[in-house]
Amino acid sequence: MTDSSFVLAQQRVAARHRARQAHLAAADKARYRLLPFSLEAASSRIGTRPAFRVSQVDAELLDDELVELLRAQVGDALRYFADGHLQDDWSAEVSLALRALLFKLTVWDHDATYGAALQNLRFTDARRDGPVLVPPSRLQKSLYGLVTVVGRYAWSKWEDWLLDEDEPRSFLSRWTWRLSTAHSAAALVSFLVFLLHGRYRTLLDRLLRMRLAPPTSQVSREVSFEYLNRQLVWHAFTEFLLFVLPLVGINRWRRWLGRTWRRTKDMIRTDDGEDDASRGELAFLPERTCAICYQDQNEDPTTAMMMAAPSGVVGSAQTDVTNPYETVPCGCVYCFVCLATRLEREEGEGWTCLRCGEHVAEHDMSFFQFTQGTESRTRPSDSSPLLGRYRAVPPPRGSDPLSAGEGRGSVHIGYGALIAAAAAAAADGDGDGDDDDNEERRNRSWFRDLWVAPRQSAVKRAVDRWWRLYGLVVILPAVLVVGWCAIPLPQYPLHGTEPEPPDKSPGHGAARVRLNFWFFLFVYYGFYSLTALVWITKVFNLYSLNWWPRSLGFPLTLSLIGALSLAVPIPVYFGRETRFLTEHNTAWIAWTFVVMALPVAMALAILMTNERHVGVRRRSLSETQRIFTSSWWSSEPDQRRRRDDGAAVAALTAAVVSSAPNITASASAARGVGRRAVVGWQPASFVRFLWLCVALFIGLLAYVLGEAYAEIYLRTLPHNSLETVVYVYGWVATVHLLDALTGWTLGIREGERVGSYPLSWVFKLYFTLTYQTYVRALYARLRSPSQFMVLQLLSSTSLVVLTPLSMTRLCHRLLVLTGLNGQSYGSYQKVQARNVFIRFLAENGSMAAFLGSVAVLHYGSNRHVYPYFALDDADGPYDLDLTLWASSVTWICELVASVAVRALIRLCFRVDVALEGRQDLVVWPELLPTCVTVTLHVLQNMMFSIIRLQFYE
C-alpha cells in the first residue's frame, strides 16, 4: 500500500467518525427539545423563551396591589371632604384616574408595569420573531390601555347601574351575566394554555399578541423556602389551636375566674351598706337606658358620667331600651336582643346583672308565652316605673283592632292616618298593575314615608348624601320662598293725591302700587297661613299629641281653620273704620299668630274636656294612667298599689278631708270603700303641655321682638359700622337669651319639663333661623364693603374660635359648677355639635333665600311690591351689585369658616358634626319634614314683614 492510499483511508475513517458524531449530537438535541428549559438556559443568548410563569403572575398581582394601595391613600386623603363619603361615591372615578396615570407612566412610556419591572420583564411584540426583542407598537399599547383602563371603568359603572335599578331589567341583566360568564370561561382557558406554554399571561395579551419577556438574557433567579416554612409552621399551629381550644373551654374558665374575682371583691369590701352591696357596676344609669348597650359603647364609665347620669342625657338614642324585657329574679329591664345575646353567650351558666349585681339565668318558659297587651308572661311589677316612650293612641273608627295594634310607631298614627289608610287601600286594590301604576305607587309611598308620616328607612335614604340633605333642608325651602314671593300680584297705580303715610315710609320704603285684595288673600296669604298651620301640626307630631277633635279628623279640622283664617279678614276689609288694619303688616302677622294659636287652644280644650288636668283614681293607677302622671316621669313607684284597697282608699280620702274640716276622716274612709276617690295629683301630660305652650309663646315673642328691632333700625337709617355692629349683636344677645329660655323650658332628658330632645332640636333651628333672617335683611341696607367685612370678620372669628372652646372640658366644668348645665361631658359635646350643625343649615338656607329673593324681586314683576329689596334708585346709597357681590363673598367666607370649625371639632374632639346631625334626623324621622317646614315658615316671615300693602278699591 502506498503512502497516498494510507492517507486517503485515514481521511475516510475520520469523515465517517465526524458524521457519526454529528448524527448522535443531532439525535440528543432532538431528544432534549421535548423537555422544558432548564435553569442553565437562562445564561444563554436565547434566555428563557418563554419567561418564568411565576414571574409573570407575580407581576400582575403586584400591579393590583399597587392600585389598591394608591386607592387606600387617596381615600385617607379625601376622608375629611363630603362627610367622608367622597371616596365611596366616586370610587370608580378614582380607580379610573389611578389606572390611567399608572398606564401612562409605565406601559406607555417604558413598555412595562411596575410589577413587571420588579420581575425584570417587559412587554414585547410577539408577532415578530428574532433574537432581538421588539417593543409593542403604539396601536397595541393604545388598545391595551383602552381595555384595561376605560373598559374596566365602563363595565363597573354598567354593573352599578344595573344594581341600583329598583326593578332589575331582566333582558339586560341576563345578557350581562352571559357576557361575564363567557369572558370568565375564555379567561380560564387562556390561563390554562398559559400554564402549558407560558407565553400569554391574560386573554387580552393573547388577543393583542403582547407577552412579557426579560429584556436581557442574563437572568438569575434564586428560590428561598424560608418564608414558606414559616407559613407552614404557623398554619399548623393555628390549626392545632382551633382544634384544642373548644375542648379546653376557654370561655367557661374565663367566666369562672370573673365570678371568683367579683366574689372576692365583695368579701373584702369595707362598705357594709346593703344598698351598695346590691348595686351593679352600671346602677347609676337611668331606667330608660339599656345597660348592655351602654356598656358596649362605653367600656370604662368615668366618675363624671356616674355623677351626671341622673341629671343629663347619657349616651345617645342607640342606648335607649328597645322591646323591653325583665330579668329574673331582679326585675331589671334590658333590650330583648341584648339580654338574649348575653344569656346565649354564657352558655346556660347565667350572667351577672349590670344594674343590681344579681345572678340572672335563662328561664325555662318560652318568650312567646305572654299575656296579650303586655311584654312578659306575668304582670310586671307595680312598683317599677314604666319604660318606653309610647303614648296610647286609640284606633280610628271602623279599623281592624289587629291592624291598629300593629301601628305603634308606624305611619298609621297622627294626621297621616287617613292618607296612609287610603294609600294602603289603593295599594291593596291595584293588584299587579302595569309599570305606570307601580311608579305612581312608589311616588305615593315616598311622599308618605318622607313627609306625611316619616319612616326611618326613608329618611335615612334621603339624608345619606350631603347634597340630598342640603337639597331638602336648605335649597327646597329657599326655592319655595323665592317662588312664593315671585308670584305676580295684580298691581294698580296709586292715587296721585293721596300721600304716603310718613310713619312707615322710612322703614320699608314708600308704597308704589296698589294690590288686588282677593288675589293677595286667597293666593299669597293663603299659602303663608297654610305653612304656619303645617308648622304647628309638625310640632304636635313631635310632641306625640293630636290637636284636632277625633270626631272631626285632621283634614276637616284643618280645612275649617284655613277657611276661618281667610274669612275673618274679609269683613275687616269691607269695614270703612277697620280697612286701615289690612294695610299693616303687623295686623296680618298678629292674625296669623291667632290662627297658629287655635290648634294649641283646641288641644288644651280637648285635654280639659277629658279631665286630663285633674286626677281621678279608682283604687290605684293603671299602667296607661301612670304614663300621664308625674310618678312615671320622676321614676317614682306607685307605692299605693302595694296597699290593699281599703287602706289605699282610706289614705286618699284622708288627704281630701284634710281640706274639708266639716267631714270626719273616719266617715269619709268608710264611705270611700269600694267607691271612686278623687285626689289632687298633676298629670304629667297636662304639665308638659303647659310647658310646651310657654315655649311656643316665647317663639312668637322672638318674632315680635325681631319686627321691633328691624323697624327701629330701618327708621333710623343710615348707620355707620359701629351702630350696625351694636344692632346686630344686640339682636344676637336677645335671640340667644330667648333660645336659652326656650331650651330650659323644653329640656332634653325625660322628666325635665317637656323633656323632648326633638322639640329642642326644632326650636333651636327656629331661633337660629330667626336670627339669621334678620341679619340677611340687614345686608340690603349696608352701604360699603367695610360694613360687610366688619360683620363677617366678627361672625367667622366667633364661630371658629369660640365654638371649639365651648366644647372643651374646662368650659363644661365651669357650666356644671355654676349650675347652668347638668349633662355629662359626652352629652354636652353632642348638644354642641348639634348646635353647630343647625347653624350651618340656618346660614345656608337664609343666605340662599336672601340672594334668590333679591335677584327675583329686582328683576321680576313684584319689584314695586317689595320696595325694600328693589334697589333700583340710581341716586340712593344702596346698590344691587354691591349687595349681591358682598353677600356672595360673605356666603363663601361662611362656608370656609364652617369647614374649618368642623375640621377643628373632628380633629380636637373626634366628633363628626354632619354625622351627628344626620343621626338625629334618622333616629327621629319626624325631624326632617319639621325642619323643612320651620325653615319655610321663618323665611316667609322675613318676606312678609317687608311687603308694602295698599289695596285697590
Image (spheres, grey):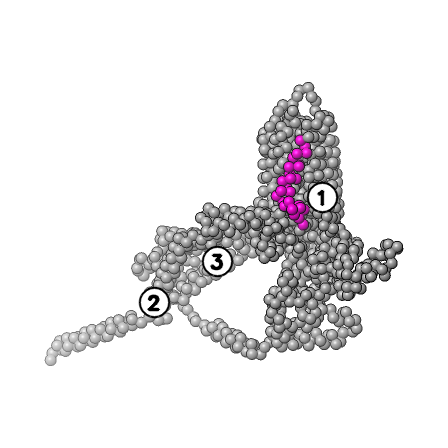
Q: Which mark is residue 67?
A: 3
Q: Which residue is mark 1?
A: 601
Can you name the residue that lies furthest to the top here? 497
Q: Report, in whole angstroms, how far the alpha carbon at label 2 lies from the one at label 1.
A: 88 Å
How far across and down, in percent of the image, does residue 812 sit? 74, 55
Circle 3 packing at 10 Å, graded few (<14), some (14-19), many (20+), is some
Look at 76% across and 55% down and name the residue there.
Answer: 616
Q: Say what amino acid the circle numbered 2 marks.
A: Leu
The answer to if 334 sits in the magenta stretch is: no
The answer to whether residue 31 shows anywhere in this view is yes
The first of marks 2 and 1 along the sequence is: 2
Foreground label between 2 and 1: 1
How far across and down, in percent of the image, does residue 90 sit? 51, 52
Q: Which residue is mark 2?
A: 196
Up the image or down, 221 lies above or below 808; here it is below
Q: Which residues are magenta?
A: 545-570
* Quadrant including the N terminus: bottom left
Q: In terms of secondary structure, where does tag 2 sit?
A: helix
